[in-house]
Image (cartoon, helix red, strand yellow):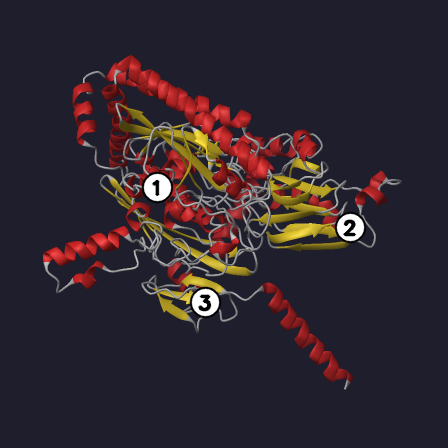
Amino acid sequence: MTQTPTHGHSHGHSHGHTPGQRSLIEKFLDENVLYLGPDPAIMGDHSVSTPTAREQAAVAVWKDKPEELNLIRNRLQTACNESFDMVEQMGAAPGAKWGDLISGIFSCQGDLSLSSAGGVLVFSVLAQHPVKFVLKYWKDDPTVGIREGDIFMHNDARYGNIHNTDQSLFIPVFDGGEIVCFVGAIVHEGENGACEPGGMPGGAESPYDEGLKMSPLKVGENFEFRRDLLIFLQNSVREPKLQLEGMKAKLHACLRVKQRVEDIIRAHSVEAFLATVRGTLTDTEMEVRRRLRTWPDGTARSVVFADSTLRENVLIKIRCEVTKRDDELIIDLRGSSPQFLNRANNTVLASMKGMLAQLFLMFVWPDLPRNQAVFAPIRVLTDPGSTLNCSPEAPNAQSMMTFFPAFTAVQLTIPKLLYSAGYKSTDIIACWYNMITTFVYGGINQHDEFVGNVCADLNGMGGAARATRDGEHSVAPIFASMADIGEQELIEEEVPMMKIVPHRVMVDNCGFGKYRGGHGYQQIATHKDTGAWGYMTNFIGSKFPSTYGIFGGYAPGCYPLCKVKGVNVFEVMKDDRALMRYTIEEIMNERPFPNARYSSHHGGLQFELGQPGELYMITQGGGGGYGDVLERDPADIVRDWRDGIVSRRVIETMYHVVMNYDTGAVDLEATQRARAEERKRRLARAVPFKEFAARWTQALPPAHLPYYGSWDDPTVLHLGAPARTCPADAIQAVMMPDPKDVEIERLQAELETLRARLA
């Protein structure tokens, strides 16, 4: 973040005064702070704090008792997992019920030391920022303070977390009048009063369209919520009951962890507890550095593109260069796209760091503790004012649309370094599907309640192929481990949205390779029994793949949003059930409903009221492939054919396998000949790299292309056309026209042309 806490003054203005006068002026100014914005010293620092003298003394005393410290650590981990389960069982929001949360224990300085094993691991490197803000600004503030029984909350991503749908709650734990730790829980609550229901408005054009924005705030005392603030928060969102229940669930989970911490302190001593919390952070960072030393020194590069702002088709470049030196990893994302000042797809730097940390927590070192020290030896370089390090004035409700591609860019490079590492704790893996392809909804449900939230289907992303086996189908999101997609029957008890096809795996929906990626599923949704119901979708990858393969593996395909409007399928199927088709491919190609309107476009749908019986159709994507398709075992092809997830066209033109489709028998000799012929064709198409580069390289992006980011020089950024550029160290923010205005201008021009012809 580039914004500093705004004090309404500059200390430099006191030059020329005596020391006594300067002291008086400084005191006056410090007591009359105008506004505390996000603190760049907090938001820009993902390292572990320097231990306090008491922590150092505790570690020194207990360092020779590893067995007891390990026992304490296991008890604390169990407490985190227990509170995680409590929130899952008590929470009302889909994110709470299906695992989009974590709970954790912070050091006395605000560093997250232990967190629940499951849930959204991104939070493990984001949760500390609001705690550190409270310690820095409210601890000694006479109007706020930190006392036994205080309850703090926060949801503004500019002060920490991913986006405003995530609400964190934390409380201090005291011993002998001194803070020994904080305990907290963070949940994707969903609805937050934004300009569109469900909390993730793709249509937000400023931070003020993004709904409730809590900077770190004391909301309760004596372990009870303040009624006035509670009512204020409930009046700030569309679902006041959900807001209350979410706050209560998180508070009681924190109280349970607090109780477990106090039990441990009584059983082992406060010094043993402090030594465990601090030692977990120190040991984790030391272990990460040890593992990095086994990696070969070198640099790997990648480029990934986001193909949409969620409101128009564009190419947003994510440029990535990863360098490993000794025990440090440097992730250089400079030269990526500038920020869009009136689009919600920007990300706060800290949020992006959290997403990158997820890569290591889940896919590289899944055996390490879930805490911020995992990412401490990793340095991230960005251009301030870029879409990956946006200013506080830029909206960030859909930050996933840029930090997910940034995740993929890094995931694409890491295997090239990890492949030759001396230590691995998991398989080498291709790129996981990276989009939250799901429905955000809002409206009046069948119980006459106004509701708005997000479906948990986003948790079913297709897994990537590994170096040793195929990827899993619709297994988990890239941001969470052990999350769930929910039960459709339970969802239909609460909302009028029905999934005619909830989770059906699609044919050829993966990245091909020696090992293929896991498939995603299609969803065909509609609604009934409501006076008003609407949909929103937020994903990229409809024109340009968002996920890639590695080491010769292919990227999965592109996935548009499809709609069937102007029809009520419940009415037209009353007398003819055979009209319905159960795949998006069949519905869009066969068009079974007469007089209906069929359309497809990019995956950014602003909130749109639908009519009962109209169809909205999306596809959860697949994972990237690993290795050369010609090396895939024909027996694996047969299995995929029998499972109905690969087509004859792909078998014959991609894998070059010859088989009997009735019996599943492979003609091995014919397959060997077919693959040998394909290798000859490859050689015939091949050209020397210099010749290839000369043919394909251009000095500038094509003039018609809405291209954002660097081209060949990372210090120069293009702003939608070759004629508009800016230096990367002085970025000019991009302002986009409203798509409706663009459409109106097009229609007006068309109207003028028709009038001229008639005249």
Q: Earlier in the sequence, mark 3 or mark 2?
A: 2
Question: Depth-wise, is mark 3 or mark 1 nearer the camera?
Answer: 1
Which of these two is toward me, 179 or 677?
A: 179
Query: Can you say whether 448 is above or below 724 in the image?
Result: above
Left or right: 58 with respect to 86?
left
Residue 409 in the image, given as x and y percentages of width and height: 41, 48
**Tag 3: residue type?**
Pro
Do callouts 1 and 2 mark residues in contact (Cβ within 8 Å)? no
Per the image, the residue denoted by label 2 is: 591
Q: Within 10 angstroms of label 3, few (less than 14), some, or many (20 or more) residues?
A: some
Q: Residues within 10 Å of mark 1 (few under 14, many from 20)?
A: many
How far apart in space, not on screen, are marks 3 and 1 (Cα)? 39 Å
Q: Residue at x 38, y 40 (%)?
A: 126
Mark 1 or mark 2: which is in front? Answer: 1
Give whichever of discs 1 and 2 has the lower sequence position: 1
In the rendered view, tell whether residue 278 sits above or below residue 263.
below
Between 403 and 543, which is closer to the camera in this rendering? 403
Residue type indicated by callout 1: His
Please indicate, yes or no, whether residue 482 appears anywhere in the rendered image. no
Residue 460 in picture, x, y percent from top left: 56, 36
Type of residue at label 2? Arg
User: Which type of secondary structure does the marked residue at label 1 adopt?
Assistant: helix
The residue beneath circle 3 is 701
Q: How many numbered discs?
A: 3
Label 2 residue SS: loop
Residue 129 circle label: 1
Query: Which residue occupies 54% across, 51% down?
Result: 540
> Who comes first in sequence, dot 3 or dot 1?
1
Distance from disc 1 to disc 2, alpha carbons, whole Å, reads: 52 Å
**How far apart in space, not on screen, are marks 3 and 2 (Cα)?**
38 Å
Q: Secondary structure at mark 3?
A: loop
